[in-house]
Amino acid sequence: MHLRSLLMTAVAAMAAIAMAAPIASAATPNPGYEQFAGCPSSTENPAITGCLRAIIKSGHFKMGNKNVPISKPIILSGGVNGEFQGFSATSKGGLLPAKQLVPGGVIGLTGLDWLVNFLSIEALQLYAVTELAGQPVIAEKFTLPIKVHLINPALGNNCYVGSVSNPIKLELTQGVTSPPPPNTPIEGQPFQSFEEHANGVTTFKDGIFVDNSFAAPGASGCVLTLFGFIPISINGLVNSQSGLPAPAGTNTTVQNTDMEIAPESLVYP
């Protein structure tokens, strides 16, 4: 298999891992392979022959008029069979939650300036956590259905953009995109280097996955509770301040990614 196609499939596999039911792992990786704890051993899943770990180390996610830097690494980990299929993960693997700081905070999201009188500086900060909202589909591009959890005390516990029934569908590529206007094509980047280490781990560096053709739905579940007991939906405020829903051709994600792969037989004794 061509290296680029192989790596596209491998990173897509990492997304699929996060959707599988986790295996409660009893195995412990060999010393030096602890980073692959999210990969099931062949005893736990006889089909597993390879362990993978991908790190989205930087980039950004623009949705509507909000552009969120990827400042905290997003890690995907698990195991695959010899053809990069049959993906699964232990309870330590899958998609690990990473809170990304949203510029403008909760006031920028809602337009409710008066919140500054009631919330501390920390409580005014807003975080976004990407979660899977469906089964990824692996192809030359891979489709990744997600939802974005907006986290702040003023928004309640279930403020999301996207859902299982109405996900944000990313089609990530290292090639050139073909977005509807007003967006114009952008180009990703194949992994720039790979190194085979003495312990059998192969690392791939500096791949860039992109998509600027996806649509983003409106927010749901955003509830401001006044006086501690009067819940008021603020989905409309969030949408108007954030430019949501946002049609295809107005949103963009760029993901700078490293990856490492190791044979399962070396990861586990």
Image: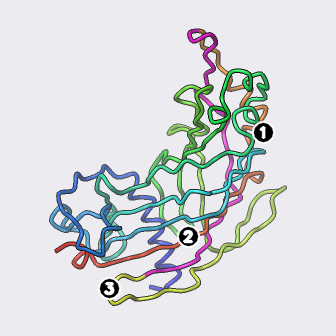
Say if 256 sits above or below 72 in the image: below
- Separation (CA) of disc 3 from disc 2: 20 Å
- Looking at the rendered structure, the kind of residue marked 2 is Thr
In the rendered structure, the answer to whether residue 149 lies left or right of residue 46 reads right
Q: Which mark is residue 243?
A: 1
Q: Which mark is residue 200?
A: 3
In the rendered structure, the answer to whether residue 269 lies left or right of residue 104 reads left
User: Residue reaching furthest front?
Assistant: 120
Mark with earlier residue (1, 3): 3
Along the viewing direction, whichever of 224 and 2 lies nearer the viewer: 224
- Looking at the rendered structure, the kind of residue marked 3 is Gly
Numbered disc in front, either 1 or 3: 3
Q: Which residue is mark 2?
A: 257
In the rendered structure, the answer to whether residue 209 lies left or right of residue 144 reads right
Element assignment for label 2: strand
Q: Residue at x 53, y 60 (%)?
A: 73
- Looking at the rendered structure, the kind of residue marked 1 is Gly
Say if 209 sits above or below 161 in the image: below
Q: Residue at x 73, y 35 (%)?
A: 109
In the rendered structure, the answer to whether residue 40 lies left or right of residue 63 reads left
Say if 82 sits above or below 235 in the image: below
Element assignment for label 3: loop
Magenta span of residues? 203-229
